[in-house]
Image (spheres, grey):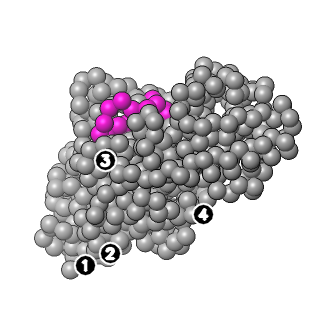
Amino acid sequence: MEYNALVIHTLDNVAVALRNLIFGEEVRAKGVEGFPVLQEIPASHKIALRDIPSGEEIIKYGETVAVSTRNIKKGEWVHTHNLESKRWKK
Amino acid sequence: MREITGYARKNGKYGVRNHVLVLATVACVNGVINRISREVPEAVCVPHSFGCGRGSVRDTQILFRILASMVHHPNVGAVVLIGLGCERSNTKSLLPFIEKAEKPIEIFNVQDCGSLQTAKKGAEAARRLLAGISGQSRIPLPWDKLLVAMECGGSDAMSGVTANVALGAVSDWLVGKGASIIFGENTEMIGTSHVLARRAKNEEVAKKIVEMIDQAEQRTKDIMGNLASWVISPGNMDGGMSTIAEKSMGCIHKGGATTINQVVDYGEWPTEKGLILQDGPGYDGDSMAGLAASGSQLMFFSTGRGTPAGFPAVPVIKVASNTRIYQTMIDDIDINAGSLIEGRSLEELREEMIDQMIRVINGEKTKAETNEMDVFTIMTVNPPF
């Protein structure tokens, strides 16, 4: 099977798109049961691996890299529109 | 067979190369170095922009430390030192720092006989030293005598996903073999204090890690003011990185996940084994000089946008984060970690990198070595005056 996404750490709640994914395309990553993306995901951007409620930590590399600012659904694009830095506000 | 070989040095270190280094003590003599380079292409000739004109204690400390470390470097078998005479780091001032190097060193100063005569004498010395060390042969190199540097530069969004993850896997493997790993680039640790401090071997190391990253963050704010948040740039964000912590996590991945045993200053020699952090800058050239000066015999260098940069006397193995740049810069890049995107397993890629590393340690040239893409530039704190 050809993978189109990568889960870097087992604790992560986001996967990384390995190429541009189109609406509805199935996420295929090692150790993950396939599920569709809910919108277009640009290459190397993040996809929610499960529902992430507002205020929850975004985990990548097994570590907190941001906090969600909205409820994020499994399969949604995770980026600056629905998270914020715990450190430097952009 | 996964045996590695090197050149035993009198101080107990091992080199993976046996170079004659022709080093300038100041920019004024660069023309002489270039002449010697044309005469004796086998020598590693290092012109540079430093050696005078900066007054601060810190700049002077760094200058002497880096120049002396190039002389001491285990990959260097003999040295021709070319000075001017009146510069800050003149050969007389440098002498106390290099006299214990226990290797042949020949010294010439342009103010003693002019540039052409110095070039002539320097070239003759380089040839003589090359002949002198050519008889030295490789012997088995114990893994615990190996220090490998991990560097990333010209990064793209995939650097932290493919190439640095692969570097991290190699780092962990090397530490498992008893070798040591060093990486720096403190600006690219901002936002990861808690992660790195947690991995420190004790409280003291943890404290140093936090201090180093706090200082890097403060310095960034002092220098960049309101633009500090642009340390993560629009380009980074377009590439899928949302926060400085996320960017930094991709960077620090290159050192792997083992215990951090020491934090060393820029260009300082580690006294501990295993994973070492260096308090050095993010700028590639300056960073490589600090890592080499700490005694690393070999570097891995991940890149996404692509850079040809190598370092004098130290083999640099280039790792592309994506297949496009690997193919575009095939003459410059040794390994394609973009293959992970095409479905290759991390284990398979790691094995390829280890095999390649072992061949390089044992003498095979990296592309940066073959192309002679050496860059030598050192960290400075204050402007010249």
Compare residues B38 and A3 and report the one nearer the observer.
B38
Q: Which residue is mark 3?
A: B143
Q: Nearer the viewer, mark 4 or mark 2?
A: 4
Q: CA distance from mark 4 to mark 2?
A: 29 Å
Above or below A20: residue B45: above
Above or below B58: residue B340: below
- Does residue B203 appear anywhere in the picture? yes
Residue drawn at (35%, 42%), measured in percent from left and top? B145
Q: Nearer the viewer, mark 1 or mark 4?
A: 4
Asked if the residue under mark 3 is in contact with the one under mark 1, i.e. CB atoms within 8 Å, the reply is no
Q: Nearer the viewer, mark 2 or mark 3?
A: 3
Q: Which residues lie in the magenta part?
A: B265-277
Q: Which residue is mark 2?
A: B342
Q: Which type of secondary structure does the marked residue at label 2 adopt?
A: loop
Q: Disc 1: which chain?
A: A
The quarter of the rendered structure image containing the C terminus of chain B is: top right
Report whether mark 1 lies on the same chain as mark 3: no
Residue B371 is tagged as 4
Q: Which residue is mark 1?
A: A2
Compare residues B237 and B350 and report the one nearer the observer.
B350
In which quarter of the view is residue A48 placed? bottom left
Q: Position of residue B129 (x, y in %)?
A: 64, 46
What residue type is disc 1 on? Glu
What residue type is disc 3 on? Trp
Report whether mark 1 lies on the same chain as mark 4: no
Q: Which type of secondary structure does the marked residue at label 4 adopt?
A: loop
Q: CA distance from mark 3 to mark 4?
A: 28 Å
Per the image, is B334 magenta? no
Q: CA distance from mark 2 to mark 3?
A: 32 Å
